[in-house]
Image (spheres, rainbow, N blue to C red):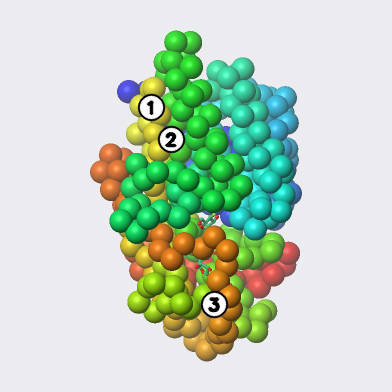
Amino acid sequence: MTPPPTRILVTGGAGYIGSHACLRLLEAGLDVVGLDDLSRGHRGAFEAISAAAADLPGSFSPIEASISDRSTCEAALGDHRIELVMHFAALAYVGESVEEPLRYYDNNTGGAISLLQAMNSTGVNRFIFSSTCATYGEPSTDRIPIAEDCPQAPINPYGHSKHMVERVLFDHAYARRAADPAFAFAALRYFNVAGSDPKIRIGEDHRPETHLIPICLEVAAGRREALVIHGDDYPTDDGTCIRDYVHVCDLIDAHIAVMNGLAPGDARALNVGLGHGWSVREVLEACRKITGHPIPERPGPRRPGDPPRLFADSSRIKGEFGWAPHFTELEETVATAWAWMKARPNGYAG
Ligand code: UFG
């Protein structure tokens, strides 16, 4: 067994999930290089991580660059003697991906390939990839909860752009076997990610915001008038869509568990979710309870491409890597997101 890595490159390190990864890795005493082109990530996130790192055992080096900038990636990998890459940098708006597919394939698929080439030329051979349940598309009801062997059939360019990276990874791992039998990767297929660092050092700040929980909280914070429920006539108990919301810190713990358990030659795909879901109305009620605000709602049309029910069978990562989520109550997750929004009403902007 190879010893767990201690020097990690986190791409998308100034984004929502990547910034939480940087912080958790630093807390675990690891040396972290955060790479982000700051097109969607926040300089403020890098600053907050750097400030927190002063009191943490690990070291933090932020780099402002794109994953497609191969020479800068090679320099970062080589100069910092990186042992494993956690790759979060990506464009992640489904609607935008339909309007600008070339941008999504270029950034998400082409960028990942460029990063893998940089790893190849610098001898870095461990990779954890931020994949998505969007690679499953709209699974038939008899495949829910969704296990990893559920057919992957994305229904939008975002899902395809991520699915293609998985394909590339399996092919690349196969091809590398002769030259580098230790090359190993895991693609973690996230379901819905929510919540913020419980110490409120960093948090979720998407521009524009499209996700359910922050939108409910923005209503409570007086930044929006009402939650528009995108469809209330789905075949679920209350007519609204059901999703599996995993806390961002638990998601990062999943990465750390896989990072530490990855064996040479591994080529893995693993779901990360709680294994059950909450409806849009249940999420709205949890947000009302935590904020004490009535959060008005309005009915709206269905959003194209929203499957009625999506939740994970995560038994593989739990059984094989010992991952166990701590935030199992939706209200606990919402409470951390609300604490961040109250502390930073304008996110990283102030
Ligand atoms: N919703 C509303 N009103 C809103 C926002 C969301 O009713 O204002 C509903 C959506 O229609 C959906 C549920 O709340 O039923 C959750 O929506 P999110 O946008 O929060 O999350 P998604 O399930 O659409 O998206 C997640 C990830 C994406 C990924 C997608 C795959 O955030 O990155 O799953 O299906 F692509």
Residue under pointer 1: 266
Q: Is residue 62 visible?
A: no
Q: Is mark 2 within 8 Å of ligand 1?
A: no
* Residue 283 vertical position relative to residue 243 in the rendered view, above or below: below
Which is nearer the eye, 231 or 169? Answer: 231
Q: Is residue 319 visible?
A: yes
Image coordinates for residue 154, horizontal then vertical, percent: 51, 47
Query: Which SS class for mark 1?
Result: loop
- Proximity of marks 1 and 2: CB atoms separated by less than 8 Å: yes
Q: Is mark 3 within 8 Å of ligand 1?
A: yes
The residue drawn where x is 54% and y is 77% is 229
Marked residue nearer the N-terminal end (1 or 2): 2
The residue drawn where x is 37% and y is 73% is 236
Report how far apart the C-alphas of labels 1 and 2 lie in the structure.
7 Å
Residue under pointer 2: 186
Report how far apart the C-alphas of labels 3 and 1 lie in the structure.
42 Å
- Proximity of marks 3 and 1: CB atoms separated by less than 8 Å: no
Residue under pointer 3: 229
